[in-house]
Every structure is written in C-alpha cells, then in structure tokens.
Amino acid sequence: MHNVSLLLLLAIPLLGSLVIFALPTGRDLLAKQVALVFSIATFAFAIVLGFLFKVSDNRADRFQFQGSWTWIRSFGVHFAFGVDGIALVLIGMSTLLVPVVVLASWNSFDSVADAEEIAAENAPKRSAKTYFALLLLLEVFMVGVFAATDVFLFYVFFEAMLVPMYFIIGSFGGPRRQYAAVKFFLYSLLGGLLMLAAVIGVYVSAGTASFAFTDLVGHVPNGATQKWLFLGFFIAFAIKAPLVPFHTWLPDAGAEAPAGGAALLVGVLDKVGTFGFLRYCLPLFPEASRYFAKPILILSVIGILYAAFLAMGQRDMKRLVAYTSIAHFGFIGIGIFAFTTQGGTGAVLYMVNHGLSTGLLFIVIGLLVARGKSRLISDYGGTARITPRLGGVFLLAGLSALALPGMSTFISEFLTLLGTFTRHKGIAIVATAGIILAALYVLLLYQRTMQGPVLEKVKGFRDLNARELFAVGPLIALILVLGVYPKPVIDIINPAVKFTMQDVGKTDPQPVSAAQPGGHK
Amino acid sequence: MNAAHGIQSAAWLLVVLPALSAAFLLLMGRRADKWGHLLGAIVPVVLFGYAAMLFFSIKSESGQGRIRDLHLFNWIPVGGFNVDVGFQIDPLSLTFVLLITGVGSLIHIYSVGYMSHDEGRRRFFGYLNLFIAAMLLLVLADNYLTLYVGWEGVGLASYLLIAYYYNRDSAATAAKKAFIANRVGDVGLSIAIMLMFAYLGTTSFNGVFAGAGNLSHGVVTAIALMLLLGACGKSGQFPLQTWLPDAMEGPTPVSALIHAATMVTAGVYLIARSAPLFNLTETGRTVVTIVGAITLLYGCVCAFGQDDLKKVLAYSTVSQIGYMFLAVGLGPGVYAIGILHLVGHGFFKAALFLSAGSVMHAMNDRIDMRRFGGLAKVMPITYGVFVCGYLAIIGFPFATGYFTKDKIIESAFDKGGTSGWILGLAALLGAALTAFYMTRALLMTFHGAKRWEDDVHPHEAPRTMTVPMILLGFLALVGGGALTFGGGLQNWLEPVVGKPEEAGVHTISPTVLLALTLVVVAGGVAGAYLVFGRRPVPVTQPAGSPITVAARRNLYADAFNESVLMRPGQWLVRGLVFFDNKGVDGAVNSVAAGFGGGSGRLRRIQTGFVRSYALSMFAGAAAVLAVLLAVRFS
C-alpha cells in the first residue's frame, strides 16, 4: 500500500507554505497570490479524490487511497494515510474553507497599514506573508489529522495543529489575543496529554505491536481498562469539540482570533473533536462507548440549551457565534452517541455543514467588523439599509445557522434529531427545543445589527465588493445546493457510518409497525 | 396511486419558476428596479394558467384516478430513512394551487400599483415570488418532510415581508415574533415527523396513512396533537395566536395574501391532508375543535376592541381560521366544509384587506378608524368592494359566508351530545360577534362624519388596484354559491378527504338553524349600528368598559407571554452568562492557576512570548518522551 495521493494532498499546501515563508518581506501581494493558488489547487485535488472515491459497502473498501511507510519501526508507528467517507468529506470541507479564508482576509494584514491603525494601541501584527504561510501550514495539519490512519500519527497532527493556530490567534487577533491564545493552547495541551497517555495505553493493552487503526479495532480488552482509555480520548476530543463543560476556551479564542482564523478554528479544528469520537472512541472502545453513551447524550443536550441561552446573552458578535457553535456541537454529540445510522450520518453531515455555515458567519462578521472596527452588537444598527449585499449574506448565514429547511444545515440537524429519537425519545424531544432558541439568537442578532433605525456611524459603510462576494459565494451556493441535493455527500458518508456502527455493535431500531409488512387492511 | 403524465409531469415548474424569479429579482439588485415588479407580477399569472390546465387534466379522470404522483428525485437516503422529493397532484392540492396562484395573481397586480411609490418594490416582488414558490411546495409535497421545507419557506417569506419596512423597530420585532411563534409550532411538526419515522419507517403521505391503522391509539393521538401544534403556530391559533395581529406591520398586500388568504390557512391544510390520521383519533379531533372554538371567540372579542382597521381584519382572520379548525376537527365528512370556508375566506378576506389597503393608500398610510369616517362617498369603488367582503363574512343570504360558515355552524350542532351543543353555540355566538365587529368597522370607516386630519386628501385608487379589488369583491359575493353549486367543491375533494357526510339526524333542523343564524347576525348588525351608527365616533379612544379594555389588549395574551416567558427568559440568560463567566470559566482559571503555582505564574505564561511558548512546548515534549521511555522499559 503505497498510494501517494494523500501524501500529495499534504504536499501541496506544505510547498505553498514554504514558498511563502521563503518570500522576501514586504511582498504581500505575491504571498497572497501564492496562498490562493496553492489553496485552490489543494481543494481541486481533494475534489478529484472525491470523484475517484468508490462508494462501497464492502469492508475492504473502508479506507481508500491508502499509503503506509514505516516511521518508528520499534514501536510499529507508521506514516500511514487513508480516508473513509467521513474523513473525505471533512477534508473536502476544510480545503474549501482555506481559499475562502484567504480571499476574505486578503487585505487584513498588509504590512503597510494606514496611520490610524498603526497608532492604535495593541494593534495586531501586520505581515501578510506570515499570516498566509501559517494558514497553509495549518491546512497541512488539518488534512493530515483527517487522513492519518495510524493512531500515533493522528496524535502528532492533532497536537501540531495547535502551533499555527496559536500564532494566528496570538499574533493576528484582537486586543485580548494573548490571553485567548494561551488559554486555547493550555486547554488543548491538557487534552492532548491525556490522549497521549491513552494512545500509549491502547498500544500496550491491545498488544498488537502496531498503531495502525485497523490493527487496533477490536483489540482493546473490555472492562475497566477500556473505560479509562475511552475517557482519555473522550476528554481530549470533548475539549477540542468542545462539549459543555469543557467549552470556556472557545468564546475567547473564537472572539479574539482574526475572522479567517476563527472560521478555521470553529469550522475545522473543532470538528477534529467530533471526528475523533466517531473515528476513535466508538470503534476502539465499543463497550465503553455504550457504557458512557447516556451521560454523554445528556451532557450534549445540556450543551444545546445552555450554550443557546448564553449566545442570547452575548454583546460581542463573535462570542455569540462561538456559543452557537457550542450548541451545535451538542447536536453532533447526540447524533454520534445515539448509535444509529441516521444519527451518525447526520452528525458527519452536520460537521461539514457547520464548517460551511459557521465559516460563512465568522467571515461575514469579520467583513462587518472590518467596516465598523467593533465586535459589539450595540455598535451597529440598520446596517442592511446601507449595505444590502452584506445584509443579505448575513441573513443567509444566520438562516443556515438556525437550520432553515431548504438549506443543508436542516438536513443534518434533522437527521441527528431523528437518529436520536428512534432510540432516546426524551433526549431528542428536549433537543428539539434547541431549534426555537436557535431562531431566537439568530434573529436577535440580525435585528440588532441589520434592522431598526440606521445608526450614524454605519452610514459610511461600503457594501461588499467583488472579491468579498467571491469569497462568500461558494459557501452560500454549497449550503443551498446541499440543502436540495445532498445525496452525493450522503452516499459517501453512509458506508463509513455503517462500519462504525458495526464496530460499536449497534443496529438501528426498527419501526414498530414494520412487523406487519404492508400495513394495508 | 397513479404516476403523473402528460402536462402533469411539468408540475415542478410551479415551484421552480417563482423560486428562480425570486432569486433573479433579489440578485439583480437595483439594475432591475425599473421592470422587476412586472416580472414578479407576471409569474403567478403564468402559474395560474398552468394550474388551470392541470385542473382540467385531473378533472377528466375520475375517483382515485384524480390522485397523481410526480416523483422528482431521491433526497435523503440514510439507512431505513429514505425520503424522496415528489409532488402529489390531487383535488386537495390543486384547490390550493388554484387559490394561491389565482388570488396571488390579483394581489401581485394590485401591488404593482400599491407599491409604486416604494423604492424597494423589486425586493418586495422578489419576496412575494419566494412566498409563492414555498407555498406551492407546501401544498404539492407528497411527504411530510418536503412539506416541512415549504412550511418553513413560507415562514421565511412571511418574516421578510413583515419586516419589509425593516428600519422600523416595530416591524422587525413583529417579524421576529412571527418567526419564533412559528418555530414553536415547528417543534410539533418535527416531532410528528420523527414519530412517523420511528413507528412507521416512512414520512410519505401514502406510507403513513397506509400504516397508521396498525398504530396504537396513543401514538396516533400523539402524532395528531403534534401536527396540531404545528398547525396552531402557522395559522395563528390559540395558544400561538399573538403573532398574527402584529404581522400587520407588513405592507397591506402581504396581509391580504399571506396573513389572510393563503399561508395562515396552511394549518387547516395540514389537518385536512392528514385526515386519515385524524380519523383514527377521537381525542385528537376533539382537541382540534376546542382550539378552533376558543380561537374563533377570542378573535371576535379582540377584533371589536381594535381601532386599527387592519388589526380588526387580522383578529377577524384569527377568528375565521378558528371556524376552519372547528370544521376540520369535526372529522369525516366535514373536512371539505373546512376547506370550503378556507377558499371562501380567501376571497372575501383578500377583498377586505385590499380595500383596507386602498383606504390606507388614500389616507397617507394612516389606519386609525377613528380618523376615517364618511369615506363611502370619496372612494365608491373601495367602499363597494368592502361591502362585498362584509356581506360575505357576516353570512348575508347568498353571499359566500352564507354557504360556507353557516355549514360549519350546522355541522357543529350535528356532532351531537353536549360537546355538539357547546361547539355549535360557540360558532353561533361567533357569527353574532362577527356581524357586530364587522359592522363597527364598516360604519367607522365609511359612514358617519368625516374625521380626517387636515393634511389628507382621500381619492380613489388607480386602476391597477381597483380592477383586482373588483374581481375579488365579485368572488366574495358569489364564490361561496359557485363552489357549493351541486355539491361542487365537496364532491371534488372526495377522493382525498372522504365522502361528504349524509346528514342523517340533525340536532336542530337546518331550516330552524338557518333562521336562528340570520337572527343572531341581524342582532349583531343592529347592535353595532345602535352603538356606532347613531352617535358620532369620538376621535380619541374613550376609556371604555373593562371588556373593551381587555379586548384592546388582546385579552392580555401579550402581557401573559411577556411576564411568563420573556422576562424569566431574560433573567435566565443573564444568570447563565454570569454563571458561565464566573462559575465555569472562573473555576477553570483558578484550577489552572493552582497548577501553575499561583496566579502570578499564570500571568507570566500568558505573556504569550515565543519564549514561554517554546518552554511549554519543550515541557510537553519532555513529558511525551518520559512516558514513552516508561512504557518501553516497563
């Protein structure tokens, strides 16, 4: 197995990142162009892989484009890559977000700033070169973390992702960027250390002398060991996702990160947590997963409601979006731990859609903040009158966040609820209340910023230009198209979810009346 | 179920065409300002033409052959959950398609004139077309999940149109309120769909209705009640009714089309469509009738406390839909009467709203009836149309309401037993109150001395507005008679909602009841005339009796929502924000500080310098190495 496709997919952004780092300081435009070209090339290649991916219920086809090279022989660590449907669609979403972020933050960090900004106290670092190089480096690790099929390699990427993101927040973020970056880093590091211990524990207890995912599945002994190892992985992923009560780093990091960084942080990095539940927690620790499912479901539902209420109470737009994301992760959580194909597929689709939708929301808020120089909701009012395009995009982003039927987010949210309902009716019904709260926080935000009397300071805003429209356009188009015709993506996800459910030893509950086929009288 | 063929296979155009037109109008921006409204107005006319052709193609079939299914594509296939997008073309959906595109066309044309001075007219037509697309999807869907997409789509269009004057805080707030109330209903619809899947493994109308017989009574009732919750949200029924009167913040054509004739009746459609489910649950149907009876009286009482003409009509809509709920709750045989009243109401309420809009247009957008009076002479056409609508709604002999509403009263009594008497009397009392508040509105607006402010110079509306008004006024007068002629609509709907019940035993003889109804209606008219017709109307609102005060404040429904839901909700949010900042995050910060050996050291970590970052990375790496070694040598 030496398929180099995925290696190549990693190499493109890595090369781009190195090229940008090598550019002389001050060549902003060139750096941006290189970043755009390489990120689009990466996305195009990911799409090609999507078309080559064979949709098949055959277990042998679970991982495709597999390539494995020995890394640390004595531990059985391999440089091993391969994607199942879940990883593939997440890679597709991530590689789409990067060029979008590049376009959206085109002028944000030019090394020549206007005098006002230089004079501003505590202004973020200005170096387009560093920023875009870090973005592409981050992309390498994001793709790697989804594509790794060796648990140790996964861990390495999992930790490596922190580094570029730490600098993106800490150097290019808002006024409290350093506090936020360190908080983000410490939280993640704590989770990472727990996971590392658990990774080693899995290696030892499975006794297969290999870190390869497929070698480990089914070999972690049942009982107390499995439960402890599960918790190690689970807490690391729960911090990353984040699930309540491990969430308090996200509002700070999401608010202080530059808009593009926040889009990738919440859109992609957080998905690694929920991806980890599905890829590692369920298949490696089936018994423990079933054992802990109920408390996790309850925690997820609490998260849906708790974070939604908190979102309503925020005065800072980006903090608000960060809290909505925590609520959304609750839906992903119930979808995964309901152990049904609808819940699982819904959760994966949710990860993709949430990346698109929240990415869009963070980007459009970033565009608004770039005009108003404030993240406070109260500093805006009646903006849609002055900037109808920005208002329209803002509304579409909001509607996708509240999962309006007809948009892709509705399908995933409904599937997670439905998949949960067939097994845990009470939990699904409580979670459904979340759709009312979602409408509240989205429409409150929209009303306060975009509707109502036009504020004086808003009057000078300029509407979205062609570049900005070009950045948000693909996300909007995809959200709408996947809302009407999600089948191609669902078809890719379905088999992988089915294998995961087999790993965890659960089958879908059957409809009660199916016992009497036909049902005609 | 037969597959659609011939001209029926193009039914997807009914949704795609207005959706494309909406997208085009909204994306084109100001470039399309000059002609955008014409494109927007022509779309429903074309659709109406096509719908008429569909009608004849279905009419040429007979019995179950009139139910046609148009499969479009596979939408969501996940394991046992497999939803297709498809349309069901049958007498029920076609009735709605004709109503939506027919009344829709007239209101679109009216809007060309009504909105002619508005700089956002193109955007307005974009939203209207979006509404048409979503509403047609709602009524054409052949499964509950596709219906749900249309269901929320009309909610979105309604939100956008209520908030059309979005720089007004009141409009933005009313729009949000409407959307949230609808979302509460949507929770019901979602749970109903999940129940269907969990118990029957399908969400298609066919599959659900075929399997429903195998379900326990409890499950069927649960599904029915959840559907009812959804219907209450959309149709402004008790206890989710308070958004509908506020929705009058939108331009008047919107009130006519969406918040009177079509969208708000979607709840009635949902229940009639789900007739095979409701037929199985007596409890479910009883709750529907109770909701209907409470709402119809509630709407009447509130309507008579309003001085705002549009609000009177809005509460009247709430009340009239209550009649429809009452009808469809009465079950087998009466569904068709509910739909009959729905269509008739679509005609006469649209006529009333459009003439109210014409009055507003003439009075510089003022809508306080205390400042009207004597408009009959200045605006004879508007007055005539309003009178047509008025006669129809109070059930004047041979006007529409006489054929549709009186049948509901009759069916309610015919239910028999104590509940039959209670429902029947409620419906009868409603008829009297309707006559009362409508007469009050008619007198205050068009009769008596003129009470206009000095700066208004009322005039008759332009022809683009009066022609659609006249047509609707005509339909309001004769529509009911035409639809019931020879059992018309009821027979037409039979393949979907079942046979019209052959009235075997009447609780009260129909002739007696008819006379009784006419007497109470005449009483209502006379009462209103005595109070409002013979004395001058005060320009400022008098103090009024306690009942009047309560009616003005919609029987304290808003006050209830505010004190029981909104305020505590705000307290909860504030409390949670405090808890999250000080409690959860505070705990985390202090634990971190504890590990770091005091907050001072934490602050030093937070300096964010590369050096300290590198240091912590180094510490991490050292830990990794140590663990690896430990494992290696153990």
Image (cartoon, coloured by chain):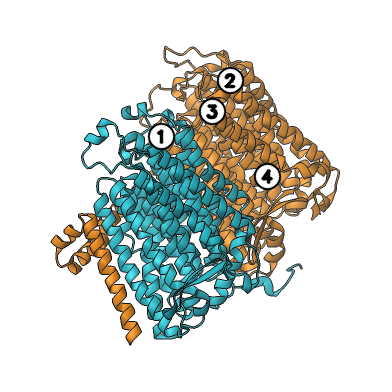
Q: Which mark lies nearer to you, 4 or 3?
A: 3
User: How many residues crowd around disc 3 within 10 Å: few (fewer than 14), some, or many (20 or more)?
Assistant: some
Per the model, the C-alpha gap separating discs 2 and 1 is 25 Å
Q: Which mark lies nearer to you, 2 or 1?
A: 2
Q: Is residue B530 left or right of residue A519?
A: left
Q: Which mark is residue B34?
A: 2
Of residues A225 and A505, the one nearer the viewer is A225
Residue type at the position of mark 3 = Gly
What residue sits right under mark 4 in the picture? Answer: B339
Per the model, the C-alpha gap separating discs 1 and 3 is 19 Å
Per the model, the C-alpha gap separating discs 4 and 3 is 39 Å
Residues under numbered marks 2 and 4 in contact, where contact means CB atoms less than 8 Å apart:
no
| Image: B118 above or below A128 | above
Q: Are marks 2 and 1 on the same chain?
A: no
Q: Which mark lies nearer to you, 4 or 1?
A: 1
What residue sits right under mark 1 in the picture? Answer: A451
- Regarding mark 1 in the picture, which secondary structure is present there? loop
What residue sits right under mark 3 in the picture? Answer: B29
Q: Which chain is orange?
A: B
